[in-house]
Image: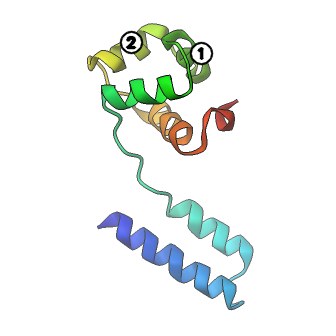
Amino acid sequence: MRKSIAESITKTVKDLNRSGVVDDITLKNIEKLCLPEIKDYPPAKIISIRKRFRLSQAALASVFNISPSTVQKWEQGNKKPAGASRKLLDIMERKGLEALL
């Protein structure tokens, strides 16, 4: 439900922006507040993202500034990415590795 509310608000503000009622700064602020919810990343998805960009576990760890053993634990399902790492996985999946470099 949260996602649909955020999408509805964003769409309404974009429409108001196009009609000149809401300025660009307000639109950007609303878009930042209505960021999509970051999904969970199960082991298979993490492996898939890493392989898509042809990265070793050590290389992915370096990009995220974490230890290679952490990436290994994610991929084995012994640990889940949280906080900044989850957001970085989301950015990498949606926008590519270049967005992080």
Q: Which secondary structure, mark 1? A: helix
Q: Is residue 61 above or below residue 81?
A: above
**Residue that mark 2 sits on:** 72
Q: CA distance from mark 1 to mark 2?
A: 13 Å
**Residue that mark 1 sits on:** 62
* Rendered-image quadrant of the C terminus: top right
Q: Which secondary structure, mark 2? A: helix
Label 2 Cα neighbours within 10 Å, binned few <14 / some 14-19 / many ≥20: some
Query: Which residue is rendered at x = 60% and y = 44% of the image?
Result: 95
Q: Residue 35: where, in percent of width, then height?
A: 50, 58
Q: Residue 26: where, in percent of width, then height?
A: 67, 74
* Rendered-image quadrant of the N terminus: bottom left
State left or right for residue 87 relative to residue 80: right
**Amino acid tagged 2:** Gln
Q: Residue 91: where, in percent of width, then height?
A: 55, 41
State left or right for residue 84 relative to residue 2: right
